[in-house]
Image: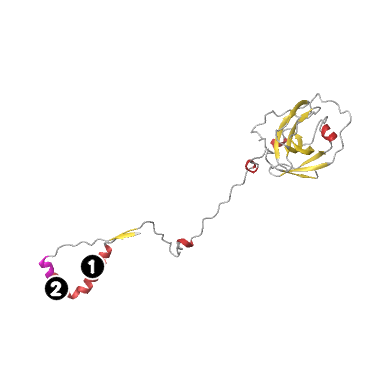
Amino acid sequence: MSSRCALATRPFSLASLASLASLAPLAPALGALLLAAALGACERRVDEPLQVAPRGEVTPPRSAEAPPAATEAPPAVAEAQNAGRCIEPTPEAPERPTPKAGPDPACPEDPTGPFQLATGKVIFLEAQAPDVLVEIARKEKERARGLMYRKSMAENRGMIFVFQQRTQHSFWMHNTCIPLDMLFIDSDGTIVGIEENTPTLNDSSFDVGCPSTYVLELNAGWARRHGVRAGQKVRLEGI
């Protein structure tokens, strides 16, 4: 902050001096008046605006001002949480069309009947999806059989394949009569990729190119209907 002051001067004539002499008794008062006028002629420059507190309020000194309130960080998306790990992202639209409802008309007859399997539950932690009751295919012969010859499966039912090794798994649809979604799930419950709408009675290999410990099979289109995407997490109960 700085200030500057300038006092104007003007010459006095003899008449003016005579007039001043007559005012000598008033000299003290005139001196005070002239001093006030001089101070009023001072020009003050302010480097920053002055804070004027509203009536009834007191502006605290700058050192006492409260720090700005912290803003809450936006929630981390699944992509950020899984940065650096193998995830096959779910596309905006399915790569294969949604198949027709019902089993393939060419479905062969089941030669032995379905296995009796233990059941568990898959809970989706990051999607508005219902829990899924699943049959557990843990043994090699159970995994080899899978959902072959089934002609229907309830909406919120499925089968989960449990592997001893965390590796890249491939599946086919040999003798599988209903179209499926395949969710490849890592050991920590992260969905690393989804094969959607896999075609019936098809011997092609389906995989997501990332290691997993579990593969969950659901009715085709189930994952997309319920907002389930790669990168989200699930919790397994009884599995």
> Residues under labels 1 and 2: Cα distance?
17 Å
> What residue is at 74 percent from the left and 38 percent from the top?
212
Q: Nearer the viewer, mark 1 or mark 2?
A: 1
Name the N-terminal-most of marks 1 and 2.
2
Number of the label disc, if any, that sits on residue 22: 2
Amino acid under label 1?
Answer: Leu
Q: Quadrant of the C terminus?
A: top right
Residue 142 appears in which quarter of the rendering?
top right
Amino acid under label 2?
Answer: Ser
Location of residue 190 in the rendering, given as x and y in whole percent from the top left corner: 71, 41
Counting the numbered discs, the total is 2
204 is within the stretch colored magenta: no
As helix, strand or loop, the secondary structure at mark 1 comes to helix
Q: Is residue 127 left or right of residue 70?
A: right
Tell me if mark 1 has few (under 14), some (14-19) or many (20+) residues whose alpha carbon lies within 10 angstroms of its own. Answer: few
17 is within the stretch colored magenta: yes
Location of residue 114 in the rendering, given as x and y in whole percent from the top left corner: 86, 33
The part of the chain drawn in magenta is 13-18
- Extreme residue in the right direction: 112
> What residue is at 22 percent from the left and 74 percent from the top?
28
> What residue is at 13 percent from the left and 70 percent from the top?
19
14 vs 98, nearest the viewer: 14
Answer above or below: position of 238 versus 2. Answer: above
Whether the residues at callouts 1 and 2 have beta carbons within 8 Å, the answer is no
149 vs 156, nearest the viewer: 149
Location of residue 95 in the rendering, given as x and y in whole percent from the top left corner: 67, 29
- Disc 1 target residue: 34
- Extreme residue in the top direction: 106
Q: Is residue 164 left or right of residue 66?
A: right
Answer above or below: position of 57 versus 220. Answer: below
Location of residue 165 in the rendering, given as x and y in whole percent from the top left corner: 78, 38
**Prevailing secondary structure class for the magenta stretch in the rendered image:** helix
